[in-house]
Structures are given as structure tokens and as C-alpha cells.
Amino acid sequence: MKRLFMTGLAAVLSVGLLVPGAVSADSSINEKLGVPIVVYGANLSKDEQASVKKSLKVDEEAEVEEIDVTGKDLVTYIKDGDPNARMYSSAKIMRQDAGKGLVITIVTQDNITQVTPDMYATAMLTAGIEDAKVDVAAPKKVSGHSALVGIYKAYEVSGETLDKERTDVANDELEVATKLSGEGVDKEKVAELLTDIKQQIADKNPATKEDVERIVKEQLEKHKIELSDADRQLLIDLMDRIRNLDIDFSKLSDQLNDMASKVKEKLGDIDPSFWEKVKDFFNGLVDSVKSIFQ
């Protein structure tokens, strides 16, 4: 009986070790980087905002700064943006130390229908945001575009200054990415394609639009992606704008690869089969205890 108890205790302790934060969480305020900033889509109802707040685990933070993002903000960061646009997708942004890279988590995956974490990451890097941990949520099915504008606003509120030309290009990048994925190209392949094209632009430093066109053609062939002439031209025009921004994207691939290898900090990111194994263990433990007294 003692051995059985010690085995059970060891299992409980192992769960605490395997799941970061399951036993205790650091809820202290980071005085160097500032508190997390939570940006809510301005068109959320009170109930929807409460739902988003729960999804983003706002109440678990020691302190947060909460702001809204509106259609007027869209115009601020995006040329020809619609000031009447309805904003629902929301985000919690936590600045990281330089070199930490980007960790993007969509905590309501079923409700962000068009944008993937990698799409957010590539667009954020284009906009000039390099080191941050961002959680994105929505209370109902939305494309996910307004969360990016909210991230821009959060950075400006925290004292950063973003180049408006870069944020505008980043938005166009997100539009192109979601357009391509909406026309049959796998979402992950879209993000990989954009990353590789920008990597080539960084490495080869193309001098003309024709050089950019060659890079796009090579990468489309490499990834075995076929686009219509119109979509191909959209991609070329986008990458030429990025070339003219003179951004160093040489570390983009490393950052995106690093995202996949970081330790998952959210319980929801743990493989569901892990919890099945834990449940099966304790079911077996209960059965063993029962058999002792029978």
C-alpha cells in the first residue's frame, strides 16, 4: 500500500514538472519591459469582451493595460483603411528581451479563420516588431486581421514608434497571405513561401523589380505552388515594396523555426494524448486501490 501511494505521488509530481506553470505561475510585474497590454476589438459586446478576457487569461496577470482598437486606428496604420471597419479579434501583447523572437499563439483557433501564427509573425517582422509574445483571441469566427492593428497600437502605447509605411506594407502582406490561402494554397505553405522569398531578398539584395520577379518565380517553383497571373503579380508587387523598405529579413527563418521549438507555456498546447495517458494512469491507480480492499 505504501509503495502504491509513493508511485501515485511520483506521478503527480511528474505532472507538475512536465507542465510549466501547473504548480505555480510568475505573476510579478516586469518593470523593465512593462505590463502586458491587452487590446480589445472595439465592436465586441460586453459579453464578448468578457469571453475574450477569459481566453487571454487577463485575470491571471498581476497587472495589465487595457485599450480598444477601432476603425480609426486602422486608418492610422493602413493607407486607405476603412474607418468604419468592425473590429473583433483581440490580443495580449507581452514585450520580450531583444533576441527572444516572436511567439504567437492563437488561443481560440476555431474562431480565427484566415490568419495563422506564422502569418502574424511575418507581418509583424515586416512592421518592425521583433521580440514579443502575443496571444490572439476572438469570441466568434472572424478573419483575424484587426488583431494585427491592435498589436501596432499596443506597441505605440508602450512607447515604441512604428514606421507607418512598414505597417501598411505588413497589412498588405497579411492580405496577400490570406488571399492565397483562401484560393487553395495551404496556409502553412503560404507562410513558408513568404519567409523564403524575404530570405532571398535579404541574401541577394535585388536591385530591380525584375530581380524580385525572378526570386518569386524560383520560390514558387521550389515550393511547387501554382498561382494565377493576377496573384503572382500581387506577390511580386508586395515583395518589391518590401525590397524598397530596406528591411533585414536574414533572421526571419530562424525566428519562425525557433517559434516551433520553444517550450509550450500554455496548458492547451500540450498534446491531448498526454492528458489521456495521465487519466489512464490514475484510472488504473483507482482500480488497483479497489482491488486491495476486495
Image: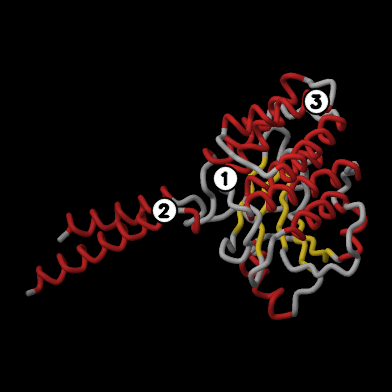
* Numbered tag placed on residue 188 in the rendering: 1
Q: Is disc 3 placed on a helix, strand or loop?
A: helix
Nearest the camera: 275 or 190?
190
Residue placed at 81% from the left, 38% from the top? 237
* Numbered tag placed on residue 66 in the rendering: none
The residue pinned by badge 2 equals 271
Closer to viewer: mark 2 or mark 3 = 3
Residue placed at 80% from the left, 49% from the top? 171
Residue placed at 78% from the left, 49% from the top? 34
- Quadrant hosting residue 262: top right
Q: What residue type is labelled 3?
A: Glu
Closer to viewer: mark 1 or mark 2 = 1
The residue pinned by badge 3 equals 210
> If the image is split into quadrants, where does the N terminus sit?
bottom left
Q: Where is residue 36 in the image (x, y as percent from the top left)?
A: 74, 55
- N-term-proximal mark, 1 vs 3: 1
